[in-house]
Amino acid sequence: MQKALKIVQEYIDSGVKIISQQDIQIQTFVGVANIVKTRKKVFDISLAATSIDNLVSGLYTKNVDYFKEFDFLKIEDPLTEEV
């Protein structure tokens, strides 16, 4: 846990913009949940909704397949050479 907290603190100290859920999160969440055709994990839908609410257009993730149906996000695997 200490290692994870250290990494988070390094992000905060670097000046990277930290996004969080907005007041409209539940409405955005429901909207995103209604457009997906496959069964998604609640966390994935919540992350997509948070991205929309914060005007984020893409995500880096190792789990690219989890987000393919969210066509409003550009999804890339940061560990591949294609990035």
Image (tube, rainbow, N blue to C red):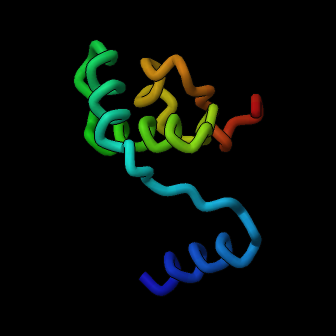
The answer to whether residue 7 is above or below residue 83 is below
**Where, quadrant-wise, is the N terminus in this rendering?**
bottom left
Tell me the residue at 59%/30% (across/down).
75
Q: Which of 72 and 40 is in front in this view?
A: 72
Number of residue marks = 0
Tell me the residue at 67%/42% (across/down).
78
Within the image, what quadrant is residue 28 found in? top left
The outermost residue toward the front is 23
Q: Where is residue 69 in the image (x, y as percent from the top left)?
A: 43, 18
Q: Nearer the viewer, residue 78 or 32?
A: 32
Within the image, what quadrant is residue 34 found in? top left
Q: Position of residue 54 (x, y in %)?
A: 56, 44
**Where, quadrant-wise, is the C terminus in this rendering?**
top right
Q: In this view, does 12 lie to the left or right of 50?
A: right
Q: Where is residue 32 in the image (x, y as percent from the top left)?
A: 35, 26
Q: Where is residue 64 in the image (x, y as percent from the top left)?
A: 51, 31
Within the image, what quadrant is residue 10 found in? bottom right
